[in-house]
Image (spheres, grey):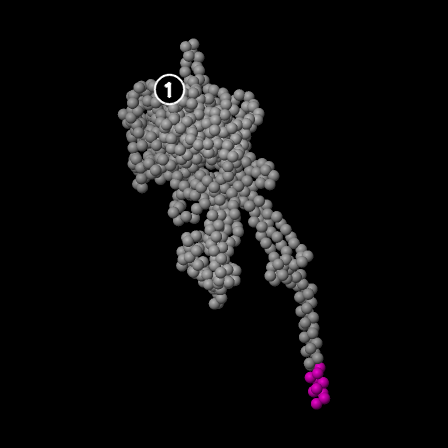
Amino acid sequence: MIKRLKLRTLLLGGFITLLFVVLLIRVFTLQVVKGQDWHERAVAQWTKKVPIPATRGTIADRNGDILASDIPAYTVIVNPAVIHENGLENEIIEGLHKILGKAESELKALVNANKDGKYLTNREVRNEGWKIDETKKEQIVDFNNELMDQLKKEKKVMETGLGLLKEQKRYYPKGTLAAHILGYTNRDGEAVAGLEAYKDDVLKGIPGEMKYESDRQGDRLPEANMVYKPAVNGKNVKLTIDDTIQYYIEDAMKETYEKYKPISMTVIAADPKTMEILGMANLPTFNPNTYWDPANDQKDFFNYAVKATYEPGSTFKIVTLAGAVQEKLFNPNAIYQSGQIYVKGTHTPLHDIVRSGWGPITYLEGVKRSSNVAFVKLGSEMLGKDRLLKYIKDFGFGQKTGIELPGEVSTTINLPGPVEVATASYGHGVSVTPIQQLAAISVVANGGKLKIPHIIKEITDPDTGKVIESPDTSKVIRQVISPEAAKETSSYLEQVVADRVIGTGKKAYIEGYRVAGKTGTAVKYGPDRKPDYSKSVVSFIGFAPVNDPKIALIVIVDQPNDPDVGGSTVAAPIFKKIVSQALPYMGVPKTTTKKTSDGKTTVERPAVPTLTKLAVKDAKQKLLNAGIDFETIGKGASVIRQFPAAETPMSPGQRMYLLTEETDKMTVPDLKGESLRDALDILTLLKCSVTVQGEGYVTEQLVTDKNGKRSVQLTLKPVKGDEASQDTSSSSTEDESGSKDTSTSDSAGGKSGEEVGDN
C-alpha cells in the first residue's frame, strides 16, 4: 500500500514537473524566441495610422487660367442606429430624396441597414451623396439644422444620424472646354483619360501619414511616440493651349455640328513656329465633371485628334506640291491637259472633280482648282515613287508625332504599285492622323522644319514655383524642305484662298490677313469596300498670316449629312471664323495695302464701322466679320455708344468697346494694354473719375466706389521699343481662265477614303 502511494506521488510529481518544464519552454518561446514578433503585433494593435492625402496638381492654360484642380467635396453619411433611436426614418428619407435625387427605396434600404437585428452605425449615401459640391453640402447642413430644431422641441438626444465626411475631388471649372485634352479622374481620384492619365505620375503626388500609439478608443496615449510623414503634393502642369482660342474653336464647331449632323468633328490649332498647340477640340464631347452621366456615349470620350486615322484627300496635296517645288519640278506657268489621266499599265482613268476638265490649263490654275490630274503628273510622273515616298515620310507621316497625349496612333504608308503612287499624290489610299496633318502644314509655314507638337508648356513645383520641366520648342526633327521652297509653296497655297473666282479655298479668305490653305474631300468606303459617294470626310488646312505665320489650323468634318458639300463649303468657313477671331486676340493687326501714284505700297488702316443703334448681336457679328477685337460693356440689347467713334482709323491690334446701357453701375472693363488716351475715353463713357500714375500703357487698374461715385486708379508703364510692325506686302491673286468654279468638293476619283476613327 505504501509502495503504491509512493508510486502515485512520484508519477504526480513527474507530471507536475513535466508541465512546469513545458510551461517554461512555452514562456521562453513566447518571451524570447517569438518575443519580437508578438511585440510587433501588440504595437500594431495600439498604433493608429492616419493617412494624409496629397493634393493633386493643377492643370492650367498658357496664361495660368485653371482648367483642373482639387476642391473640397463632401460625402453624406447616415447612422441607422441613431436615426431609428430618434424616429427620424421618414424625415431623413424624404429630405435626402429631395436634395440628392436618390430613389426613396434605396434610401430606405440604407436607413434600415442592420446586421443580426442590430442597426448599423455608418453608411455612405452612394452615388448621389458621394463627393457632393459646396451647394449641395449647404443644403444638407440646412436640412440637418432643421432636424436638430425638431429634436430640441421634442427634447430628444441632439443627434440626427445625418453627417458629412469632408474629402476632396477633381473639378473642371470650364466644363466641356478642352475636355479631350484634360481627360478626367474618377470619383476615387484615379486618372482615367487624357492628360490626367498621361501625366498621372506627375500630378498625383505622394500621400503621407501620421502614426501614433493609442488606447482602445483610438485616442493618442500621453507621451506616446508619433511618426509624421508629410504628403508630397502633385506638380502643377501648364498647357500650351489658350482657353480663349480654345473657346473660339469650340464655339465655331457647334454651328456646323448642328447644321450638318456629322459623325464627328476635329479642330486643332498650333503656333507653326514652335508647334505649341493653341487649341484642340472634338465633337461630340463630354463634361469631365459628369463623366459618369449615362447620357454620355463612349464615342464622346474619343480624342480623334490623335487617336483617329482618316484618308485626307486633297489636303495631302501640300506634300506633293512642296516636294515638286523643292526638286524644282514645279513650273506654275507650264500647261497640261486637265480632266483625266491614265496610269501606266491601267485602263481606268483617274479624273478631276469636273470629269471633262477645264481644258489645257497651267499648273498654278490646277493647284487653285485642286486638279487631281495636275498632282498625279507632279507626284507620279515628275517626282516618282521613291522621291514621293521620301517626302511623305520626311513630312512626318507613318510615324507618331510624339505629342504629350495618350493613345496616339500612326499607320505605315507604303506605295506598292503605280496606281498607289498616283492616288497618293492627291491624298487617296493613304491614312493619316489630324495631328500629323497639322505638323505637315506647319513645315510649309515655318520655313521647312518638322517639329514635335507640344501640349505641355511647363511643369512646376507648387511649393517653390520652380519650373521642373519645359519642352524644348526650338528642337527640329529635320529640315524637310528649304526655307525658299517653303516660301514658294506658301505663295501657291495662298492663291488657293486669295483667288475669289476659282480658288477652292476662297471661303477661308479673311479681309486684311494673308491666308494660305488647302481644302480636302475624301469619299468613304461602303461595307462592300466600294466607294459610297453619299459619305465623305471633308477638311481644310491652312495658316495665317502668310508673311509671318502665327496660327496653323486643321478642320475635319466626318460625314456631313449633305453628300454634295465638300471641304470648301463645310470646313473652310470654320477655319475663317476661328482665325478671324484668334489673330486680333493674339494682337496681329490687319493690313490693307494700296499703291500710291509714285508706285510705293502703303498700309491703310481700316475705318471703324458705325455700330450705334445696332442690336448687340448684329454689332458683334459685324466686328467678327471685320476681324476686330471687341468688348461689350453692359447688359443692354443694343449699342448706345461706341469707342473708337465711327470712321476713326483703327490702330493695329486696337480693341472696340460697345456701350449698351446708360448707367454708371456697369462693370469697368479690363484696360490693361490700352494707351492712356483710350483708357480715359472709355472711363469717361462710364462716368468714372480717374487718377494716373506713370507713363506709357495701362499695366494695372484699381476700381473703388465711395458714396456711389466710382474712381479708377491707372498705373502706366512704357513699352520697350516699338513692336507694332506693319506688313506692306499684299495678297497676290491670279485668275488664269476667268471660268466659274462649278465644283462642290475638291477631290474625286482614285481610291476612296476610309472612315475617321479607324485605328
In x, y percent, where is residue 674?
50, 26
Residue 196 image position (x, y, % from top left): 50, 43
Q: Is residue 618 above or below residue 759?
A: above
Quarter of the rendering containing residue 564:
top left
Q: Residues within 10 Å of mark 1 (few under 14, many from 20)?
A: some
Image coords of residue 502 (percent x, y): 33, 23
Q: Amino acid at mark 1?
A: Thr
Residue located 42% across and 28% down the image? 658
Judge from the rendering whether residue 17 lies leftward or rightward of residue 675; answer left or right. right
The location of residue 340, given as percent across then percent down, is 30, 26
Task: Look at the image and say whether residue 27 sits in the magenta stretch.
Answer: no
Picture quarter with the C terminus: top left
Which of 652 and 351 lies nearest the eye of the viewer?
A: 652
Query: What secondary structure is marked by label 1?
Result: loop
Q: Is residue 383 left or right of residue 141?
A: left
x 49%, y 20%: residue: 725
Residue named by callout 1? 733
Q: Residue at x 52, y 53 (%)?
A: 165
Q: Nearer the viewer, residue 233 or 320?
A: 233
Residue furthest out toward the left: 356
So how many labels did they put on this image?
1
Residue at point 58%, 40% (across, down) = 462
Q: Which residues are magenta?
A: 1-10
Q: Does residue 643 show up? A: yes
Check the picture and name the quadrant holding the N terminus.
bottom right
| Residue 396 visible in the shown view | no
